[in-house]
Image (cartoon, rainbow, N blue to C red):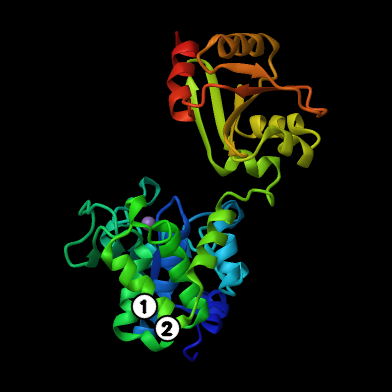
Amino acid sequence: MGNDMMSWLQGLKNNFSKQKQVSIVMGNEAADLDSMASAVCYAWYLHLDDPSQNSFPLINIPRADFKLRTEAVYLFQEAGVNIDDLLFTEDIDLEKLKAAGTLKLVLVDHNKLASSQTGLERLITGIIDHHADEAAYPPAAVTDIKPVGSCATIVAENFLKDQQDTIEKSLGTLLLGTILLDTVNLDPEAGRVTNDDSKAANKIIEISGLDSKKLFDKLQFEKFNVSSLGSYDLLRKDYKEWQMGSVKLGIGSVLLPASDWAAKDPDIANECDRYLKEHKLDVLLAMNAFTSPGFTRQLVVYVPDGNLRSKTVTFLEGSDLGLEKLEINSSSDGCTFYNQKNLGISRKKLQPLLKEFFEG
Ligand SMILES: [Mn+2]
């Protein structure tokens, strides 16, 4: 096996099927960069500490969703990690392992299981986290829970304590990149960083020689760089839906101008239609928000039913959104595009207005 993180990662899939007792290290169901990087790095730490524990990181989302986390796509690639080597939710059946009596769980970046994973609490043996402690785990579990800026900081502290020699470019990149993104480049003004974050990050910089400014700038850019995503993925990257009376309504938050979107995809309406049907929606909205150069909001409305469309459009145009029709060069006839002049109305604020309208 050796002390090489890449060889260990490359062997995960093969070794997993052969395991008897396993420790699954997993992040929370939102699966942000912190959750994913902490799971991989902490499982590697546990493996170095005691290979007989059979520690495996689980990326707590379906494989197809990974590409939506564009900052993670960048950082894992920069660290030399091949995504094909990682284990996702479809690769590990936790219920089956539980039934076989071979499962132990180590949580990173959360300390209470998702509602879809309840029933596994008593299998939790360890927790590394930076959220408020909800004490929803067995008292015997070994925990390190403290309010630092990034869970990756606590993972890094473990390596710095007794596996400092193993911090090379790959591991350093995953840990440092995550800490920097979570703490806005260790900037006290942003109010996220703690002394522990700075201490861990600076130690990694010292050991690995990584350029933190360059790494942070690139991560920050990639986080909002949705150029690799098609319409369908743009819609689902940050998506919420609600039942409002007889109307099922979904809103995707899209991080690019409608004109750029139309340039990428000449037939947005077609993709909206596919999305709407798959989610069994009546109304699909996209709230576009971007900075170019000033902060701008736009709204895209897709409602195939004629009556419901005119009802929805009349309501939206008469609301406080400050809508102004936008001419988009696109064959997307079925979509209506607007500039939203009232920048204060986010999805969180629009949702109750729509609910009142459709339920009233
Ligand atoms: Mn976190």
Q: Residues within 10 Å of mark 1 (few under 14, many from 20)?
A: some
Residue shown at the point (59%, 51%) measured from the top left: 68
User: Label 1, on which residue?
Assistant: 203
> The residue under label 1 is which amino acid type?
Lys
Residue shown at the point (47%, 66%) measured from the top left: 177
Q: CA distance from mark 1 to mark 2?
A: 6 Å
Q: Residues within 10 Å of mark 2 (few under 14, many from 20)?
A: some
| Residue 228 or residue 241, whichever sits in front | 228
Q: Secondary structure at mark 2?
A: helix
Q: Secondary structure at mark 1?
A: helix
The x and y percentages for residue 63 are: 58, 58
Residue shown at the point (20%, 54%) measured from the top left: 135
> The residue under label 2 is which amino acid type?
Ile
CB of residue at label 2: within 8 Å of ligand 1? no
User: What label sits on residue 30 in the rendered view?
Assistant: none
Assign ligand 1 to one image quadrant: bottom left
Q: Residue furthest left?
A: 139
The x and y percentages for residue 210 are: 50, 76
User: Label 2, on which residue?
Assistant: 207
Give left or right: position of 295 versus 188. right
Give left or right: position of 217 versus 109. right
Task: Reply above or below: 157 against 131.
Answer: below
The x and y percentages for residue 330 are: 81, 29
Dividing the picture into quarters, in which one does residue 178 lie?
bottom left
Count numbered badges in the picture.
2
Residue shown at the point (35%, 62%) measured from the top left: 151
Dividing the picture into quarters, in which one does residue 85 lie?
bottom right
